[in-house]
Image (spheres, helix red, strand yellow):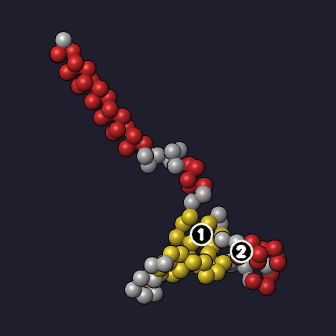
């Protein structure tokens, strides 16, 4: 009877180990991360401007922002756009300020 408990526990641990390895293998699979990649924030460039401060260009949903990163957090400096600001409508400028 004691042998059946040992066998049962061994089988359970082997199954749990297999599930753990399978889960680690799937962690980087694209279909698991599909939802997060749609709302991803990408930092395309960053430059240190002091001991604990960094300027970075972040891309969110096709829009680019200049941000400052420091000890006190992150702050938006401005909205970057390839179009000239004189050609932007008032609504586009207002949307650019919403971050």
Q: Which residue is mark 2?
A: 96
Name the quadrant containing residue 4. Answer: top left
Q: Is residue 34 above or below residue 94?
A: above
Q: Is residue 60 above or below residue 5?
A: below
Callout 1: SS: strand
Q: Position of residue 74 (x, y in %)?
A: 53, 75
Q: Is residue 83 above or below residue 4?
A: below
Q: Position of residue 21 (x, y in %)?
A: 33, 39
Q: Residue 68: which disc?
A: none
Name the quadrant containing residue 95. Answer: bottom right
Horizontal relation, residue 23 to residue 74: left or right: left
Q: Could you tell me which residue is drawn at 64 percent across and 81 percent down?
A: 78
Q: Could you tell me which residue is drawn at 51 percent across and 45 percent down?
A: 32
Horizontal relation, residue 28 to residue 36: left or right: left
| Quadrant the N terminus occupies | top left
Q: Could you tell me which residue is drawn at 56 percent across and 49 percent down?
A: 34
Q: Earlier in the sequence, mark 2 or mark 1?
A: 1
Q: Distance from label 2 to label 1 (Cα)?
A: 12 Å
In this rendering, the label closer to the viewer, 2 or 1: 2
Q: Could you tell me which residue is drawn at 82 percent across and 78 percent down?
A: 90
Q: Which residue is mark 1?
A: 59
Q: Is residue 19 above or below residue 66?
A: above
| Quadrant the C terminus occupies | bottom right
Q: Position of residue 41 (x, y in %)?
A: 56, 64
Callout 2: SS: helix
Horizontal relation, residue 2 to residue 81: left or right: left
Name the quadrant containing residue 53. Answer: bottom left
């Amino acid at each position: 009877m004691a042998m059946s408990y040992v066998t049962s526990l061994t089988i359970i641990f082997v199954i749990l180990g297999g599930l753990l390895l399978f889960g680690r293998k799937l962690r980087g699979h694209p279909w698991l991360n599909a939802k997060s990649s749609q709302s991803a924030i990408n930092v395309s460039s960053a430059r240190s401007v002091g001991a604990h401060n960094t300027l970075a260009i972040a891309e969110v949903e096709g829009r680019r922002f200049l941000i400052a990163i420091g000890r006190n957090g992150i702050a938006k400096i401005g909205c970057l756009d390839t179009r000239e600001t004189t050609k932007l409508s008032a609504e586009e400028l207002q949307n650019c300020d919403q971050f």
